[in-house]
Amino acid sequence: MQSLAEQKDAIVQIKINQMFNEMMHKDYFSFSAIVECAKLLGAYGTEFYKGGIGELLNVMHCVDFIKIPDETKESIPQLIQQHLSNGDYSILIATNYINNKKEFEIKIKRKEEEVKKNWFMSLFKN
């Protein structure tokens, strides 16, 4: 039986996938959706809007995707992945094409699990 934390993580992953894909299929970029994802991932705080990536994503809010330069548009998933990984989770965004439609799949993992794993593996080095 899954713990409450595992159940929450599963729901958070579903919700983030849904929010992200809905945003990416709109005609415009929504920074609000990124903020909501950040809150779920523990990556939202006073510094969220500051710095290169946060400022860029915020400036793009409500800009039509067709008007965003191709290079920037293609880098959006990687920028979001990097920016949202500043919280309690590490995230990975993969791109899939289903029936010629671009779909994004987001996987999340609690960082505390990674810290424990890295610490455990470090015991065996040397």
Image (tube, rainbow, N blue to C red):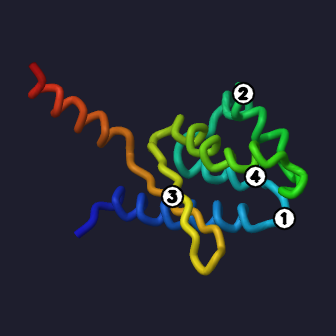
Residue that numbered label 4 is attached to: 32
The amino acid marked with disc number 1 is Asp
Mark positioned earlier in the residue sequence (4 or 3):
4
Is tag 2's residue or tag 1's residue first in the polypeptide sequence? 1
Q: Is residue 30 left or right of residue 92?
A: right
Name the N-terminal-most of marks 2 and 3: 2
Q: Kindly report the distance in space between the C-alpha atoms of the residues bearing marks 4 and 2.
A: 17 Å
Q: CA distance from mark 2 to mark 1?
A: 24 Å
Q: Residue furthest top?
A: 126
Q: Which residue is mark 3?
A: 106
Are there few (<14), some (14-19), or many (20+) residues within 10 Å of tag 3?
many
Image quarter in which the C terminus is found = top left
Sequence-earlier tag: 1 or 4: 1
Q: Secondary structure at mark 2?
A: helix
Disc 4 to disc 3, C-alpha distance: 18 Å
Disc 2 designates what residue? Answer: 52
- How far, Cα to Cα, is label 3 from label 1? 21 Å
Vertical comparison of 27 with 75: above or below: below
User: Between tags 1 and 4, which lies in front?
Assistant: 1
Q: Is residue 67 shown above or below 124?
A: below
Residue position marked by numbered label 1 in the rendering: 27
Neighbour tally class for label 2: few under 14, some 14-19, many 20 plus, Cα within 10 Å: few
User: Which of the two residues, 104 or 89, is positioned nearer the viewer here?
Assistant: 104
- The residue that appears at 76% across and 43% down in the rendered structure is 72
Residue at point 53%, 35% (across, down)? 86
Q: Toward which corner of the image does residue 58 lie, by quadrant?
A: top right
